[in-house]
Image (spheres, rainbow, N blue to C red):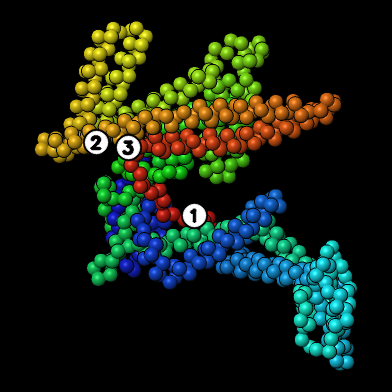
């Protein structure tokens, strides 16, 4: 469901505007309508604050990565003595120094690698030869390309051979490089020994910088996060401050916002106490009213899934509670293994216990529902960690085998679930259209329901000899005529009687699209069967491999079996778990949302309030 909102307009004298925003932020329930980013970024002060906020975000991101890699326990205390951006500058300086040192280290290592064939040649040796009018040049070439004539023409001296690569020096009275077909090695400015010493110093400085960064990551990251939150609050405050319109020669500021109806009374009392002029009214369909969900504990866990697609329009309906039960069933059928469901169910409790945010707690609650659904429908699919339950001889499972479905039954179950959800979606569309626009506008949708089920049910009854063929034909004619008339005559009721001919024409055109669309939607649910079967087969394959490849040696056999099972089922759980999450998403956002007439475009309700906590 969607929380009902009240639209507010505040009128403030320009000199009181800043103080008013402070009081509004303390209230913490008003979603302020902000101007577009292009307008906001024209403000130089705001642009500077956003730039600093980005610097904080980048530093915190790098420190988080260090703590995750090192698996360190962060100090929870916030250092109140740290003010301004001193700590930020300190950390940025350390990161810049480390990055520069890593680059210097890379360059030195490349230079050492380049002059490696020269061993510890001292470049000052060249000066002694130059004084005697001799010039040394170093070269490399393959053994097959070395010309023996170079020994006589250029006094070549071979000093190292590495594999098929030959390194040599030439001694000539010319300063220019000899015209030979070999790669010239530039004379290093420093000897290999000097470079090794420099590399040691650089490595030590890198270690020292890393130790300082790790210390800050462990002990001061909470302080950085706190300062970043303060800055984020400042950015939000500046954006809101720039979001008011001017009136009365720029002496009055007009600010627009939204407040949940449940907070209306407390908000009004606070505004009247502060002697702030305001007006409130119900939002109109033209307003871009923010969306705040209002669901029970069960549906609340699925709100994160809804937000992966889009939030509903304020004047529409939140479909989260309607698709949530289906999503559990679909996930369970796609994963198709009761053992995997048990693992997810157990893991969800640890996730909820260790959760540090509302999002993670909701994710844990969602995992609980999905794990439970997978256990139930994994059992119905007849698979437990790749074992086929219908073939097991355990005594306790014999009475339960009647609930296990074979592959044909699972196929028809997938189609049946698709038919049920599509029908459910059409009913929701018809009812919500009726409530939003009036009864006439819903007749088109109800006509399709009558057409589909008015023909499907008599067909099924006739197949079971429940009704006579004559009654079947009569029912087909009645329901087809009634449904067809509703679809053709009421698909554009806003046009009135004059629009009936056009309505019939557009209705006939829409019949083909709707029929093929519904058929395609129904066939999409076969993926529930296919994914479940593939996961079960892959699990049984890993069980077979574990038994087949295990050596016939005590203890070693058990270790090999456990290793293969853990590796195989781990991969299977990851791959099929990912598919079990994504494909029900597709069925929800395409098949269900489309047939239910989902109207998106809503934006999240974000109250203007201070995120940071004051510290002494």
Side of 364 relative to 10 (left or right): right
Q: Which residue is found at the position 80% from the left and 70% from the top?
A: 145
Side of 603 relative to 492 (left or right): right
Please report whichever mark, 1 or 2, sits nearer to the chain's N-terminal start.
Answer: 2
Report the Cα–Cα distance between label 3 and label 2: 19 Å
Please report whichever mark, 3 or 2, sits nearer to the chain's N-terminal start.
Answer: 2
Can see residue 260? no
Q: Which residue is found at the position 35% from the left and 14% from the top?
A: 460
Report the Cα–Cα distance between label 3 and label 1: 37 Å
Q: Secondary structure at mark 2?
A: helix
Q: Secondary structure at mark 1?
A: loop
Q: Mark 1 — residue? A: 611
Image location (x, y in percent) of residue 99: 67, 67
Q: Secondary structure at mark 3?
A: loop
Nearer to us: label 3 or label 2: 2
In the rendered view, would you say 353 is above or below 287?
above
Q: Mark 2 — residue? A: 509
Q: Quadrant of the N terminus?
A: top left
In the rendered view, would you say 585 is above or below 85?
above
Nearer to us: label 1 or label 2: 2
In the rendered view, would you say 461 is above or below 554?
above
Image location (x, y in percent) of residue 404: 55, 17
Question: Is disc 3 surrounded by few (<14), some (14 to 19) or many (20+) residues within 10 Å?
Answer: some
Q: Nearer the viewer, residue 454 or 308?
A: 454
Query: In this view, which residue lies farthest toward the left?
Result: 498
Q: Nearer the viewer, residue 534 or 219?
A: 534
């Amino acid at each position: 469901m969607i929380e009902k909102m009240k639209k507010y307009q505040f009128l403030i004298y320009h000199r009181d505007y800043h103080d008013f925003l402070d009081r509004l932020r303390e209230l913490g329930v008003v979603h302020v309508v902000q101007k577009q980013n292009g307008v906001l970024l024209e403000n130089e002060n705001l642009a500077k604050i956003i730039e600093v906020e980005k610097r904080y975000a980048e530093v915190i991101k790098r420190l988080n990565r260090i703590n995750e890699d090192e698996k360190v326990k962060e100090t929870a205390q916030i250092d109140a003595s740290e003010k301004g951006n001193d700590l930020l500058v300190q950390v940025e300086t350390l990161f810049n120094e480390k990055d520069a040192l890593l680059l210097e280290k890379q360059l030195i290592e490349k230079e050492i690698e380049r002059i490696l064939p020269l061993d510890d040649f001292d470049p000052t040796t060249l000066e002694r030869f130059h004084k005697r009018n001799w010039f040394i040049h170093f070269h490399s070439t393959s053994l097959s390309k070395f010309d023996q004539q170079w020994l006589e023409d250029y006094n070549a001296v071979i000093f190292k051979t590495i594999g098929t690569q030959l390194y040599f020096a030439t001694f000539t009275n010319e300063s220019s490089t000899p015209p030979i077909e070999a790669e010239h090695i530039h004379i290093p400015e420093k000897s290999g020994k000097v470079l090794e010493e420099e590399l040691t110093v650089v490595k030590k400085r890198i270690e020292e910088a890393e130790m300082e960064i790790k210390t800050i990551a462990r002990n001061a990251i909470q302080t950085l996060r706190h300062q970043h939150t303060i800055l984020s609050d400042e950015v939000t405050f500046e954006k809101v401050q720039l979001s008011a319109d001017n009136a009365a020669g720029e002496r009055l500021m007009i600010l627009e916002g939204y407040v949940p109806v449940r907070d209306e009374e407390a908000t009004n009392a606070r505004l009247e106490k502060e002697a702030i002029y305001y007006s409130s009214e119900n939002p109109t369909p033209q307003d871009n009213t923010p969306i705040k969900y209002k669901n029970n504990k069960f549906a609340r866990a699925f709100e994160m899934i809804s937000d992966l697609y889009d939030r509903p329009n304020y004047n529409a309906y939140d479909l989260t509670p309607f698709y949530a039960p289906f999503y559990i069933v679909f996930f369970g059928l796609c994963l198709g293994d009761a053992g995997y469901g048990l693992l997810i169910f157990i893991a969800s409790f640890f996730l909820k216990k260790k959760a540090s945010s509302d999002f993670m707690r909701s994710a844990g609650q969602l995992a609980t529902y999905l794990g439970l659904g997978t256990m139930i429908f994994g059992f119905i699919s007849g698979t437990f960690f790749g074992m086929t339950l219908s073939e097991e001889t355990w005594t306790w499972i014999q009475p339960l085998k009647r609930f296990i479905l074979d592959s044909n039954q699972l196929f028809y179950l997938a189609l049946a679930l698709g038919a049920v959800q599509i029908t459910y979606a059409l009913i929701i569309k018809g009812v919500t259209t009726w409530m939003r626009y009036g009864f006439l506008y819903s007749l088109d949708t109800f006509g399709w329901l009558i057409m589909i089920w008015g023909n499907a049910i008599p067909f099924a009854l006739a197949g079971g000899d429940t009704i006579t063929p004559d009654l079947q034909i009569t029912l087909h004619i009645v329901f087809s005529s009634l449904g067809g008339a509703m679809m053709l005559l009421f698909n554009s009721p806003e046009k009135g009687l004059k629009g009936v001919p056009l309505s019939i024409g557009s209705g006939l055109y829409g019949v083909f699209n709707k029929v093929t669309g519904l058929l395609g939607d129904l066939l999409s649910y076969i993926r529930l069967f296919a994914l479940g079967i593939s996961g079960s087969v892959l699990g049984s394959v890993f069980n077979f491999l574990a038994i087949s490849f295990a050596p016939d040696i005590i203890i070693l056999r058990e270790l090999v079996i456990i290793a293969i099972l853990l590796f195989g089922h781990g991969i299977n759980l990851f791959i099929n778990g990912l598919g079990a999450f994504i494909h029900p998403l597709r069925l929800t956002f395409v098949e269900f949302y489309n047939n239910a007439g989902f109207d998106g475009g809503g934006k999240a309700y974000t109250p203007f309030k201070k995120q940071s906590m004051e510290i002494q």
